[in-house]
Image (cartoon, grey):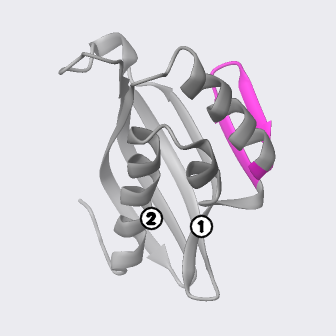
């Protein structure tokens, strides 16, 4: 069951995937806190600049023309913190369906500072 108590959380996720669709690493990374962490299988990025550098290289290379997809399944807002659990994946250029082996379960930790939601931590793992 999904609980939504702040439309800003949905807006932040929309901005993340709009920046991805535009292959805009600067706009993508701007949504992360300066000390954010990203954990994926075999990968740990510490800090906004590490996220930006990784995404810039990916958008210029293997992820050029790709589109990130994310479907929140559970959103819990506790004060100025939100935890989002979602099903996610990457559609490569020209793909219209996500192959099962690229489906991920993701956890986002978001914080609201000065009225704006930002990503404090993100992690994903294979869904299967």
Q: Nearer the viewer, residue 32 or 85?
A: 32
Kindly identify which residue carries mark 1: 118
In the depicted structure, whether residue 45 falls above or below residue 95? below
Q: Are marks 1 and 2 in contact (CB under 8 Å)?
A: yes
- Across and down, in percent, residue 40 comes to 62, 28
Instruction: Please give the label number shown on residue 35.
Output: none
Identify the image quadrant of the N terminus: bottom left
Kindly identify which residue carries mark 2: 12
**Toward which corner of the image does residue 43 lie, by quadrant?**
top right
Majority secondary structure of magenta residues: strand
- Across and down, in percent, residue 16 comes to 46, 52
**Toward which corner of the image does residue 105 lie, by quadrant?**
top left
Q: Nearer the viewer, residue 6 or 13?
A: 13
Identify the image quadrant of the C terminus: top left
Q: Nearer the viewer, residue 57 or 14?
A: 57
Residue that appears at 57% across and 54% down: 27
**Toward which corner of the image does residue 109 lie, by quadrant?**
bottom right
3D distance between C-alphas at marks 1 and 2: 7 Å
Provide the residue span drawn in magenta: 36-48
């Amino acid at each position: 069951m999904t609980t939504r108590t702040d439309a800003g959380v949905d807006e932040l996720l929309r901005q993340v995937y709009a920046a991805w669709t535009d292959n805009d690493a600067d706009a993508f990374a701007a949504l992360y806190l300066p000390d954010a962490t990203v954990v994926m299988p075999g990968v740990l990025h510490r800090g906004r600049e590490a996220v930006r550098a990784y995404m810039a290289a990916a958008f210029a290379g293997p992820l050029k023309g790709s589109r990130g997809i994310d479907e929140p399944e559970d959103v819990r807002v506790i004060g100025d913190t939100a935890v989002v659990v979602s099903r996610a994946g990457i559609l490569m250029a020209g793909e219209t369906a996500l192959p099962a082996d690229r489906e991920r379960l993701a956890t986002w930790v978001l914080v609201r500072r000065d009225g704006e939601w930002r990503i404090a931590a993100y992690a994903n793992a294979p869904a299967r």
